[in-house]
Amino acid sequence: MQRLGLNFLKPRLAAWRYQRGSRSLAANLSMSQTAVTADAVTPHADTREQEEDFDIPEEVETVIEHLLVGLKDKETVVRWSAAKGIGRVTGRLPKELADEVVGSLLDCLSFQETDNAWHGGCLALAELGRRGLLLPSRLTDVVPLIIKSLIYDEKRGACSVGSTVRDAACYVCWSFARAYEPTELQPFVTQIASALLITAVFDRNVNCRRAASAAFQENVGRQGTFPHGIDILTAADYYAVGNLNSCYLNISVYIASFPEYTNAMIDHLIAMKINHWDSVIRELASKALHHLTPQAPDYMATTVLPKLLTMAVGIDLHGRHGAILACAEVTHALYKLGLQTNRTVVDMISSECVDALKNIHQNLHNRKQYRGFGGELMRPAVCSLIEKLSLSKMPFKNDPLIAEWQQFIDDTIRTLHLVSSGVKDSMMDAVIAALSALCEEYYQTQSGQADPQIQDALVSRYVDGLKSPQILMRCGSALALGCLPRFIISGKLEQILEGLQQMCTVTQEASFTEARRDAVKAISQVCVTVGVCVQGSPDSALCGENVAGVYDTLLKNINDYTTDSRGDIGAWVREAAMTSLMDVTLLVASTAPEILSSDQMRCMMCGLAKQAAEKIDRSRAHAGNIFLRLLHSTEPAVPHIPHREEVLAIFPV
């Protein structure tokens, strides 16, 4: 079609084209000054002949119509061909008609059109720009549409479309860098630079991040007007932007340290990424806001946090989830900043924000947002909120809210078996982190002791949970006991160890393997928390009286060979037992090696050597690493290792 159309037009270059001079570096360098002058004169000689009015046959309009329709085709290759055709045909049209074509192209970039039309429109604009057919006077209309294309992301069912549009928008920016003199693009530099950098670090799609980085590089080189271009390019080059985590958590922080880009990046995260359909992006965006807070603390406290708090109780599930995570991260970041100037969080954020943070849990609870799929997103997010507000030392001590939070944590552990398998582990981690921070901050009396009433209730509740018929209730209760702070365990150590040991030693069918693994982990966590005291009370520290029981339990579990339809699941327990043995042994050896018997050490080292010859690669490597760690340890040295010298000869340090 495009070739038929070209047959109706004279084969010539439009005189009205925008010309930036010679593009070839070699030609520029080799041309003598006279040649340049002669070259500059030539076009004017035949301009008159070229600018005479000439009639355009109707067939050409039909061709252009077809090409414009081709820009919206469902196949990329057709859209690309149509864009090239529009470029070729427009190059032979008079100025007025060419401008009409540009107007039709801009209609493709409207929100009534599909993503295919946006993609085709961007490709065609890039083609016109490259050929000098998009005059600078049109840039005021085109640039805002390109900025929109750079963040085009449409939700379709369970996924989104738009990565091709964003990629093509980067191509437009790349072609503009080559097409225009720096003075023409100067008014749009701030917009284009910010939009390209935001795409280069925050886009979900690696192709788009790389395309934006390449377009930014082209602009820095050819325009020379992009602020801090060279510095940013070294940090955000083609390879660096390949890693999404690094983009969000490292590169973005470096770019935001230049004030021209700080607010634009924060605003983009709030507007487009906190409510993104992909939960990974929402979590990364909230962490990015944490890292960006030091760059603009006042803006975060007075503008961003109130916006997030409104979203946190809004109607959109994804927006709610992202906003709660972001509120937690931003508050914690402000707390860390306050430490440097001896200010508390409450000094930095308004009392309305403090109240709104308190009301998030109650609001979700009243609206029954903790059920079903929504609950799988909301529960970990609220756990994260509880953890970060506790770490930020919010002044909620003795507030009824703390009891509500505790109830929410216990309820989450109780209902873990209702959660779909993909999110169980992450939810468990979030719950345990929240419980640990909550106890540490709000359950300690002035003297550093535990409130006896709360202490009894917590320990009894989780020890009883170890006997639950629900396996995940057992896992959660074991890990909860393992994360309790020292002042709560103190005086209850016997009760806790007895419950955990009982759960590990009762011969149970395969179904409780995960619970045994978590109980074994919890035993070492509890021992490390309370520490060792040779003459201490067995109810408050690891001592000669209870150390034997701990080793017996761990050494028995190093030989757990349970199997079921999933294979050798006992390997989980064996690996956990090996890690726990290492932690407890290094702890005791550093403070009271005399309470370790040679028999225990012999059984442990032989057990590790046996595990280092097992058939599962991961278990062998794990056992080998721990064996060497204990053998080579000098600070502290582990006593009673049988044949230490001979073994050291085999495994020199």
Image (cartoon, helix red, strand yellow):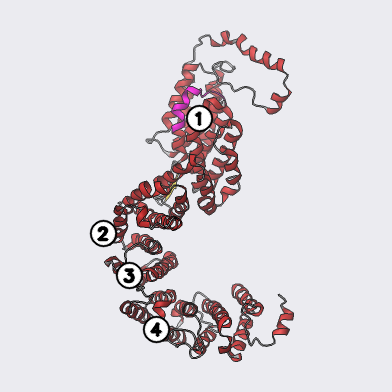
Q: CA distance from mark 2 to mark 4?
A: 38 Å
Rendering coords of residue 85 (x, y %):
54, 27
Considering only vertical position in the picture, is 337 above or below 263? below
Residue at 44% x, 39% y: name it. Answer: 115
In the rendered view, tell whether residue 304 sits above or below residue 490. above
Residue 454: image location, x then y, percent: 32, 76
Query: Residue 564, relative to residue 117: is it above or below?
Result: below
Magenta residue span: 131-144
- Counting residues from the N terminus, which is met first, the one under dot 1 or under dot 3? 1
Q: Are marks 2 and 4 in contact (CB under 8 Å)?
A: no
> Which of the two discs, 2 and 4, labels the residue nearer the N terminus?
2
Q: In the rendered structure, which disc, 1 or 2, sits on the residue that comes first in sequence?
A: 1
- Mark 2 vs mark 3, CA separation in Å: 19 Å
Q: Is residue 157 left or right of residue 568?
A: left
> Is 646 placed left or right of 108 in the picture?
right
Give the percent coordinates (x, y) of residue 143.
46, 31
Whether tag 1 and tag 2 are in contact, CB under 8 A, the answer is: no
Q: Label 2: which residue? A: 367
Residue 574: give x, y in percent of width and height. Answer: 54, 79
- Tell me the residue that label 4 is attached to: 492
Label 2 or label 4, whichever lies nearer to me, is: 4
Q: Is residue 136 magenta?
A: yes
Q: Can see residue 335?
A: yes
Which residue extends farthest front? 342
Estimate the spatial distance between the alpha carbons at disc 1 and disc 3, rounded to whole Å: 58 Å
The tag on residue 406 is 3
Place residue 37 in its image quadrant: top right
Mark 2 vs mark 3: in front: 3
Give the Cα separation between the discs numbered 4 and 1: 73 Å
Residue, disc 1: 125
Q: CA distance from mark 1 to mark 2?
A: 48 Å
The CA span between labels 4 and 3 is 20 Å
